[in-house]
Image: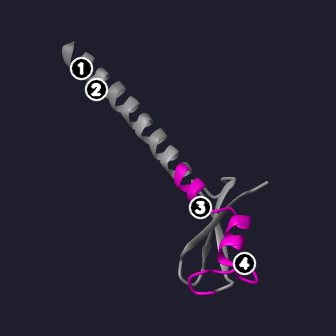
């Protein structure tokens, strides 16, 4: 009987710890996303004639969701050198 109770307590504790760690990871990802400049700040900072990679000057830019394909928070990265450039929000 004590073994079953201990096992249930272990499983519940493990589930709570996993949930807490997942929430912390999502928070850190969002904070990292917020540190990227938005597109207006990126254009102002780089002083380039058009939106392109500041590192290799490629105009081939892809975007992906922060946590999933359909995430509204987007990161734009260079296809050539894989440098993360700026962030946007899908409207």
- Could you tell me how far apart the alpha carbons at marks 4 and 2 are, in whole angstroms? 52 Å
Q: Nearer the N terminus, badge 3 or badge 2?
A: 2
Residue placed most toward the observer, 7 or 30: 30
| Residue indicated by mark 3 | 36
Residue 10 disc label: 2
The quadrant holding residue 17 is top left
- Could you tell me how far apart the alpha carbons at marks 3 and 2 are, in whole angstroms? 40 Å
- Nearer the observer: mark 4 or 2; the answer is 4
- Nearer the observer: mark 1 or 3; the answer is 3
**Crowding near pointer 1: few (<14 within 10 Å), some, many (20+)?**
few
**Crowding near pointer 3: few (<14 within 10 Å), some, many (20+)?**
some
| Residue indicated by mark 1 | 6
Residue 63 position within the rendered picture, expressed as x and y whole percent measured from the top left: 66, 68
- Nearer the observer: mark 3 or 2; the answer is 3
Residue 6 position within the rendered picture, expressed as x and y whole percent measured from the top left: 24, 20
Question: What residue do we see at 69% from left, 65% from top?
Answer: 41
Under circle 2, the secondary element is helix
**Crowding near pointer 2: few (<14 within 10 Å), some, many (20+)?**
few
**Crowding near pointer 4: few (<14 within 10 Å), some, many (20+)?**
some
Magenta stretch: includes residue 88: no
- Could you tell me how far apart the alpha carbons at marks 1 and 3 are, in whole angstroms? 46 Å
| Residue indicated by mark 4 | 51
Residue placed most toward the observer, 71 or 82: 82
Which span is picked out in magenta? 31-57
């Amino acid at each position: 009987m004590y073994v079953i109770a201990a096992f249930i307590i272990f499983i519940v504790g493990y589930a709570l710890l996993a949930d807490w760690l997942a929430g912390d990871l999502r928070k850190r990802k969002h904070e990292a996303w917020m540190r990227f400049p938005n597109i207006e700040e990126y254009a102002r900072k780089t002083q380039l004639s058009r939106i392109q990679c500041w590192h290799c000057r490629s105009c081939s830019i892809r975007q992906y969701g922060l946590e999933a394909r359909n995430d509204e928070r987007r990161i734009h990265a260079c296809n050539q050198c894989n440098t993360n450039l700026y962030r946007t929000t899908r409207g």
